[in-house]
Structures are given as C-alpha cells and as structure tokens.
Image (cartoon, grey):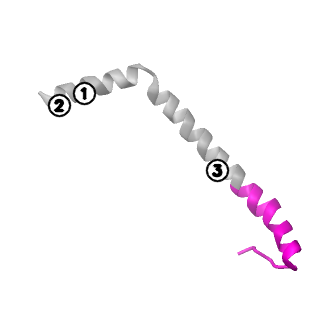
Amino acid sequence: MKTNKTISEFKEFIAKGNVMDMAVGVIIGGAFGKIVTSLVNDILMPIVGILIGGLDFTV
C-alpha cells in the first residue's frame, strides 16, 4: 500500500534528524530576518533620510 510506504518514509526522515536541522534553520532564519529589519529601519533609513534632505521614513 502507498500509505504504508509514505508513513515508513516519513519515520525514516524523522529518524535521520533532518527535522531538527530544518527547525534550527527556520529559527535562525527568523531571528536573522528581524535583525536585518531592525538594522535597516533604525540605522540605515535615518541616515538615508538625512542625506536626502531631512525626509522622515517612519510610518
């Protein structure tokens, strides 16, 4: 049966530890995204606004 094969492949996938690697990658990616967003909004855009002529990019 196809269902049994799918379940056994899923169990094998979990046993390899790929799920943990993927979870760690997602968590690190989310944290990195927030760091970059904060860097751009709080440091880079005020500098660009001053250079352009005092524009305020805050919403």
Residue stretch in magenta: 37-59
Q: In the shown orientation, is residue 43 left or right of residue 20?
A: right
Q: Residues within 10 Å of mark 2 (few under 14, many from 20)?
A: few
Q: Residues within 10 Å of mark 1 (few under 14, many from 20)?
A: few
Q: Please give the name of the residue rendered at 51% of the width and 35% of the height, measured from the top-left corner.
A: 23
Q: CA distance from mark 3 to mark 1?
A: 34 Å
Q: Is residue 36 above or below residue 56?
A: above
Q: Which residue is mark 2?
A: 3
Name the residue rendered at 24%, 27% in the picture: 7
* SS at mark 3 in the image: helix
Residue 58 colored in magenta in the image: yes
Q: Quadrant of the N terminus?
A: top left
Measured along the vertical axis of the image, is residue 38 above or below residue 31? below
What amino acid is found at the position of numbered circle 1 in the picture? Answer: Ile
- Identify residue for label 3: 33
Q: CA distance from mark 1 to mark 2?
A: 6 Å
Residue, disc 1: 7
- Tell me the kind of residue under disc 3: Gly
Magenta part, dominant SS: helix
Local secondary structure at mark 1: helix
Are circles 3 and 1 on residues that touch, CB within 8 Å? no
Which residue reaches farthest left? 1
The answer to which of 52 and 1 lies nearer the viewer is 52
Please tell me whether residue 23 is drawn above or below residue 53 in the rendered image.
Answer: above
